Amino acid sequence: MDDGMRQETTLRVKNKFSKQYRNGYPLITKEAIINGKDLKEEGVLVKLVDESNQFLGKGYYGNQNKGYGWIVTNNENEEFDTRFFVRKLQQALGKREFLLKDNSTTAYRLFNGEGDGIGGFTIEYFDGYLVINWYSEGIYTFKEEVLAAIGEVLDVKGIYEKKRFNTDGGTYVEDDDFVSGEKAPEPHLIKENDVNFAVYLNDGAMVGIFLDQREVRKTIRDKYAKGKTVLNTFSYTGAFSVYAALGGAAKTTSVDLANRSLPKTTEQFNVNGIDEKTQSILVEEVFHFFKYAKRKGLKYDMVIMDPPSFARSKKVTFRAAKDYTSLVSDAIAITEHDGIIVASTNCSTFGMDKFKGFIDQAFKDNKKKYKILEEFSLPSDFATIKQFKEGNYLKVVFVQMLG
Ligand code: SAH
């Protein structure tokens, strides 16, 4: 769509919120806006002004979680045309030059929404192919401009997309995700720190690997796995287990309740030359497994936990913000003396300090001492800005249980 044809709606910001927008806060929150009811069509341009009509920023309307969309410029005359997207993409590529040159890693995030100047969509690179994640109908109306900009800046074989919105917002739309170019093989093999991964670019919302844990996985392989028994809970396709096995772990055990996790984890071991029969892959409820392991007196040198922020199974509802302490307690019960717990969360509603508080509480409850060995947040290709702390959602802590 030609930018000149887009409607523009002026949104008035309540006084107590105008300062945050002046300081560069990018999300247009519902609570900050006086006349949200004036927003009609997703994708219209919006101009934010304060209660005295002073210009605060310009962006677009796109319903996403708590937001009405994103501010993308503080220049009142900016046009959201292909050239605008080209500039933002070029800046994003510049920040990632070290990854583009790195032959041991062929998959990473190329564009990270508001962290790269435009909230609402991300682009990931999987060795020759792109996957665009669209988080609102509003940003999706800019698809043509984004694709044209990609065509100018990048040379790729093919492009896929994930529409992560529906009329209620937030959920993946089941669809054919192929957009243009040539189709990727299924599976498509990518490398991360010289480890192989089979990814499926056209098989639902998730492609088989979460790229934000790259540095955590490398650390487990290079510094901690050797000779250890490793339990990987909420294991999905077993990425942590593969790295641990390659790092010389005595044995890995992967636990996930999704049926797909067994063939998917088997495949990731196999594409790295590991016979899955030397490892253990269990399709099981994690909380049920913890009880079983405790009853049997099983212990592990390393316990990895990377649960979703929210998960409901038949028997248990898990909310990271409420239940993480109890999850750490479960892990403590089956960790060897001097063993290591890798606690990870992608929950954006609390920060690192609070997360460490949950962990601390669990050790206190169990009258155990511990030492923090490593801390991780998002890797640099998941670019974030200081004005939007929620964007830096990942928190990973390696804790050694003492005595
Ligand atoms: N740690 C993974 C990503 C985890 S995604 C990685 O490194 O790639 C979250 C996973 O948790 C999903 O695969 C889901 O099936 C699983 N899951 C959610 N609730 C669960 C539960 N109660 N028990 C076991 N697995 C669960």
Image: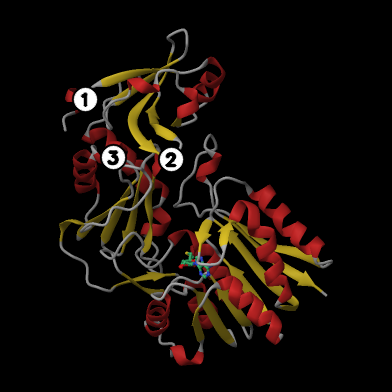
Q: Which residue is mark 1?
A: 6
**Given the image, on which type of amino acid does mark 1 rest?**
Arg
Q: Looking at the image, do the residues carrying marks 2 and 1 touch, with CB atoms under 8 Å apart?
A: no
Q: Nearer the viewer, residue 206 or 392?
A: 206
The label shown at residue 97 is: none
**Given the image, on which type of amino acid does mark 3 rest?**
Glu
Element carrying mark 3: helix
Rendered view: 377 above or below 45: below
Q: Which residue is mark 3?
A: 137
Q: Is residue 176 left or right of residue 240?
A: left
Q: Is residue 340 left or right of residue 390?
A: right
- The residue mark sitting in front, 1 or 3, is 3
Name the residue located 73 percent from the left edge and 74 percent from the top edge: 333
Rendered view: 117 above or below 276: above
Q: Is residue 98 left or right of residue 250?
A: left
Can you see residue 224? no
Residue 291, image x, y percentages: 65, 77
**Given the image, on which type of amino acid does mark 2 rest?**
Asn
Q: How many marks?
A: 3
The label shown at residue 65 is: 2
Asked where in the image residue 327 lies, by quadrant, the reply is bottom right
| Among numbered discs 2 and 3, the one appearing first in the sequence | 2
Name the residue located 71 percent from the left edge and 85 percent from the top edge: 297
